[in-house]
Image (spheres, grey):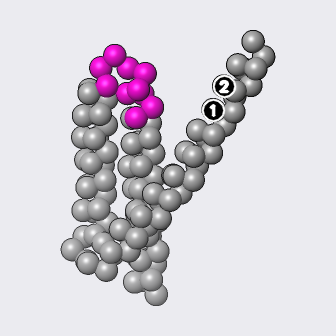
Amino acid sequence: MNEVLFMVLAFLAGVCLGIIFFGGLWITVQRALKSNMPGLWFAGGLLSRLTVTMLGFYFVGAGNWQRLLICTAGFIVARFIVMHYTKKIDELRIEIRKEAVHET
């Protein structure tokens, strides 16, 4: 019973780490496109995202390859979750811009 709970928690931790990583990537790209120094955004974003993700995997895995594998599965699932929501946000922004252009 305890091992199943640890596996579920590892999966949820992987999902959280994936949301942080891929959501942070999306935010980094959005901010860098509007910045005068995009390289700083990309470098800082990469460093912070990798630090959080690698530390998370290190502590979740804790020397157990099964937990590490389950955490990785959660990380991959989070990629699709973030892709789904960011696509909706981008489509909404495009729709708002189209409406603003038609009103003027």
Residue underneath mark 2 = 97
* Left or right for 35, reference 88: left
Reply above or below: 79 against 39. Answer: below
* Left or right for 83, reference 75: right
Residue 16 in sight from this viewpoint: no
Circles 2 and 1, Cβ within 8 Å, touching? The answer is yes
Range shown magenta: 29-38
Q: Secondary structure at mark 1?
A: helix
Alpha-carbon span between mark 2 and mark 1: 6 Å
Residue occupying the point 76% across, 20% down: 102
Residue 47 in sight from this viewpoint: yes
Reply above or below: 33 against 2. Answer: above
* Left or right for 45, reference 86: left
Q: Quadrant of the C terminus?
A: top right
Reply above or below: 63 against 36. Answer: below
Return the residue found at the far bottom: 1
Residue underneath mark 1 = 93
- Measured as percent of width and height from the top left, residue 26 is found at 44, 41
Q: Amino acid at mark 2?
A: Arg
Residue 97 sits in quarter: top right
Q: Amino acid at mark 1?
A: Arg
